Amino acid sequence: MMLGSLAGGIGLFLLGMWLMTDGLKFAAGGTLRRLLARWTGTRLRGIASGALITSLVQSSSAVTVATIGIVNAGLMGLGEAVTVIYGSNIGTTMTGWLVALVGFKIDIKLLALPLIGAGMLLRLLAAERRLGAFGMALAGFGVFFLGVDILKTAFAAAGASPALGLLTGGGASAVLLSLGVGVAMTVLMQSSSAAMAVIITAAAGGVIPLESALAMVIGTNIGTTSTALLATLGATPNARRAAAAHLSFNVLSALVALLVLPLFILLIRNLEHADSLDLGVPVLIALFHTLFNVLGVALMWPLTTRLVGELLRRFRSAEEDEARPRYLDRNVVATPVLAMQALSMELIRIGAIALRMAKAAMSAEGAAGTRLYTEAQVIDRLVDAVGEFSAVMQRSQLPPELDDVLPNALRVTRYYTEMAELTRLMDEAQRELPAIEAVGLAADISHFKGSVVDLLDGADAGAPDYSGEVNAAQLESLKEEYQRLKSHLLRAGTAGELPVRRVVEYLDVFSNMRRLAEQAEKAARYLAALRERGTSTEEAESVRDADEAAA
């Protein structure tokens, strides 16, 4: 009977947590991400926002996942994300306070049943709106507290069980065993909040002593990292970094908390036995949980910069490695010829990525999707590196004959950046547009795309067979083909073969393809000129060095 009550109470905990979390997430809509993106300008604000939002949503996992999404979107740095994770560990302690202050201070049924009734009424009346999602969260609170009531009754009737003798024996072995029980409970339930509720109700019912309950609380902080670790299997580098930060914070805090646990117990016992202060076991456990997590933040605060730096060096993806310049070494700036060669080689790398993106978007196999966004970020980072390197070259007093090198190099980066942006626009548009079924028009479109790909193949300035004249001729031919395709599309719209709106949308896509080809041709032409300038400068310096040696 007791086991059935325990299973039912835990089940209601988990069901209530699920309803609360999902309901509040749906009710918040995009607000959660916007708040996290805006409120994390400093470490203190990041911690505060993480704690506040987690206490409202009642799920540190939901806040962590939202934070990872914001980092991946480039709206938040990893440093700010780590502070939000710190704060979410403080915010998740709110569940313990709810159980301690509400679950043991008032008649739960007087609160839980009206919450469930009111929540389900809102859900029925506004199922598709935010108010309905809020109703689901409200019902979840009620279900959660019903679970508290059932567990209170079950543990009160159980008393001390012989099976728990090891936990009540005291000493280091009991503490370590209690710690392991806390970890196992959290891993099995996949909810540290539910595990906390079980621990508090068990301790309040006299089933486990306070010392064991506190060690189990430390275990829940370690066990909760399993959710983040499981979620990062096959995930992005930022997701793995956030999970590693979460694990580092929780494990280090748990180790320190174990070392000072006797002092915590002594402090709490003194508070418990104070004549003027009778807090009760549930409040003492909730207080310890909060103090323990605040202590963890205090310990990690001075280590955050080093932790972020270490995480950025690890879990690197191929794209992030590609975003690191390979040729831009400031040590060669003092030698203009070497600096020019390094700059040209890096520009060729950027061009290869831009051309690869463009060909992927032109492919008839469909949209390239997320990969294009990632590669666009790679280009942006490499372009920034080229800009910084060019600024250093400018300060090094280049020879007068190289005055136009840096402006032309920056012009090339602008062309490649525009190519990346056009590629993404084309990809997004093609995902929304249906295929054209008219045989003649479809054939013209396929031929036009093939011509663009041919031009892109010839626009690789780093290829040994690159010819500026051939590439320029390809562009002129492509422009004429675009005009013919444009006329064909307009005739199809006039004849009613295509809706006018579709004609306009297709014209935008094909216009972007033409512009893409123009940017590729211009970038290759200027980059080839830079390479020739570097070669001629090197030959001139060799001749000058030979003359000086002969003299």
Image (spheres, rainbow, N blue to C red):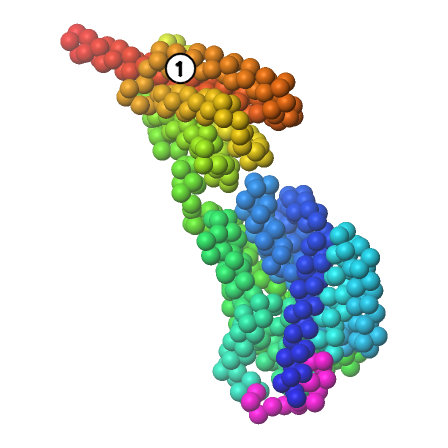
Query: At label 1, which amino acid type do we have?
Result: Gln
Mark 1, Cα crowd under 10 Å, few <14 / some 14-19 / many 20+, is many
Q: Residue 453's spot in the image, x, y percent?
A: 41, 25
Query: Which residue is at a point 54% across and 17% down the rendered structure image?
Result: 488
Residue 27 seen in render: yes
Residue 151 is covered by the magenta coloring: yes
Relative to 162, is 353 above or below? above
Q: Is residue 3 left or right of residue 444?
A: right
Q: Residue 269's spot in the image, x, y percent?
A: 67, 80
Query: Which residue is at a point 58% across and 35% down the rendered structure image?
Result: 432
Which residues are the magenta region? 150-165
- In the structure shown, which secondary structural element does the residue marked by tag 1 occupy? helix
Query: Which residue is at a point 68% across and 66% down the rendered structure image?
Result: 17
Dot 1 corresponds to which residue? 474
Q: Nearer the viewer, residue 251 or 128?
A: 128
Q: Residue 387's spot in the image, x, y percent?
A: 47, 25
- Quarter of the view holding residue 298: bottom right
Residue 374 seen in render: no
Spot the residue most to the bottom: 162
Q: Nearer the viewer, residue 419 or 228?
A: 419
Q: Would you say the magenta stretch is mainly helix, strand or loop?
A: helix
Looking at the rendered image, the quarter that the N terminus falls into is bottom right
Q: Residue 43's spot in the image, x, y percent?
A: 62, 49
Relative to 118, is 468 above or below? above
Residue 199 is covered by the magenta coloring: no
